[in-house]
């Protein structure tokens, strides 16, 4: 079903920001680096742009972890960690560095590469390899925090259909300043299992597909021959598929990417290229 994405309005605090305020540095970011603002400190309290005053000692007690982000809704005094705990999984917005786009971590698994690269750099490389250009209609599978959908638009895509099956993921994204553009009218967010929803899409209706699934152990159906055939069906002739793979099983010598490439060829993709330890790119001829 269609999901109406509504970004939460408020301020994001991190340990880095609180430490800067404690040192008397008053130009900080309250949206994880998307903008810088001047803050006033009055009698030990931080004066927010809304005029609300928040005790600095209180902030120090709440904002403890360097890798966590904490949200204060506009007009409210409550502050909470941007995370969700369920009996099955634990979701958190993970700060990887001061003033840059965070990643999503689900039960210890990062949804972006963070070793020697930031989540934003990871996203830009994916969009570049998908060769998004002006006027492209894009299918984005596994929305996550929405970065690939958002930056597809920034690269000129005319519209994006992005599919996410986990409502908790979209709820975390609501509090992430770097996900706000998911509310753009040109992005259609679908809350559904992509392996089922793909059958509802018309044939040859997309110019590009960005397929960024969880690891195989968590979503094997998104790596199946049957699913790849559906991807080929909905892609227009000459269209490009970017398929993130990572490198599962690399230490045991498993040729995971070769297996993905072979199934894509069987599905109907004739031009298939492996980007070592990262992705497989395929073109429908």
Image: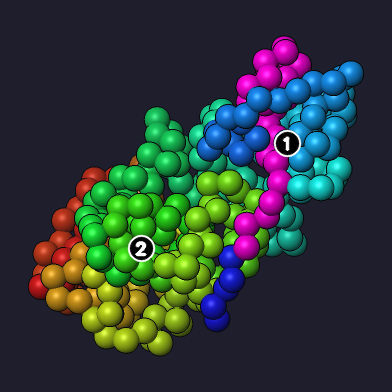
Q: Quadrant of the C terminus?
A: bottom left
Identify the secondary structure beneath mark 2: strand
Q: Which residues are magenta?
A: 6-28
Circle nearer the N terminus (2, 1): 1
Give x and y (percent) for residue 75: 81, 47
Please state if 53 lies on the left or on the right of 153 as rendered: right
Tell me, yes or no, whether the highlighted magenta stretch contains residue 14.
Answer: yes
Give x and y (percent) for residue 252: 35, 46
23 w.r.t. 159: above or below: above
Give x and y (percent) for residue 248: 38, 51
| Residue that label 1 marks | 49
- Image quadrant in which you'd find residue 35: top right
Residue 190 seen in this snapshot:
yes
The residue sitting at 46% across, 71% down in the picture is 188
Of badges 2 and 1, the one in the foreground is 1
181 w.r.t. 69: above or below: below
Q: Residues within 10 Å of mark 1 (few under 14, many from 20)?
A: few
User: In the orientation shown, which residue stands out farthest toward the top?
Assistant: 23
From the viewer's side, name the closer residue of 137 and 60: 137
Residue 218 seen in this snapshot:
no
Tell me, yes or no, whether the highlighted magenta stretch contains residue 45.
Answer: no
| Residue that label 2 marks | 211
Please state if 224 lies on the left or on the right of 88 as rendered: left
The residue sitting at 34% across, 45% down in the picture is 124
From the viewer's side, name the closer residue of 171 and 157: 157
Identify the secondary structure beneath mark 1: loop
From the viewer's side, name the closer residue of 45 and 121: 45
The residue sitting at 19% across, 69% down in the picture is 239
């Amino acid at each position: 079903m269609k999901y109406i994405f509504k970004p939460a309005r408020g301020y994001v605090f991190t340990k880095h920001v609180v430490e800067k305020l404690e040192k008397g540095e008053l130009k900080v970011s309250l949206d994880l680096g998307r903008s810088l603002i001047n803050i006033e400190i009055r009698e030990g309290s931080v004066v927010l742009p809304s005029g609300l005053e928040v005790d600095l000692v209180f902030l120090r007690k709440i904002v403890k972890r360097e890798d966590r982000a904490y949200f204060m809704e506009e007009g409210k005094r409550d502050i909470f960690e941007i995370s969700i705990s369920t009996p099955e999984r634990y979701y958190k917005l993970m700060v990887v560095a001061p003033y840059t786009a965070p990643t999503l971590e689900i039960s210890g698994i990062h949804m972006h590469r963070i070793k020697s690269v930031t989540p934003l750099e990871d996203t830009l490389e994916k969009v570049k390899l998908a060769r998004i250009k002006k006027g492209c209609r894009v299918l984005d599978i596994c929305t996550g925090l929405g970065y690939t959908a958002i930056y597809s638009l920034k690269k000129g895509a005319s519209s994006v259909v992005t599919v996410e099956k986990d409502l908790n993921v979209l709820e975390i994204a609501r509090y992430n300043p770097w996900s706000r553009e998911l509310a753009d009218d040109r992005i259609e967010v679908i809350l559904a299992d992509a392996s089922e929803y793909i059958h509802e899409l018309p044939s040859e209706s997309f110019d590009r597909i960005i397929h960024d699934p969880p690891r195989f152990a968590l979503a094997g159906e998104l790596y199946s021959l049957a699913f790849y055939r559906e991807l080929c069906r909905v892609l227009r002739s000459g269209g490009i598929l970017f398929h993130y793979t990572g490198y599962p099983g690399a230490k045991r010598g498993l040729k995971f990417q070769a297996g993905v490439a072979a199934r894509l060829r069987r599905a109907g993709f004739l031009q298939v290229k492996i980007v070592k330890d990262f992705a497989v790119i395929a073109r429908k001829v």
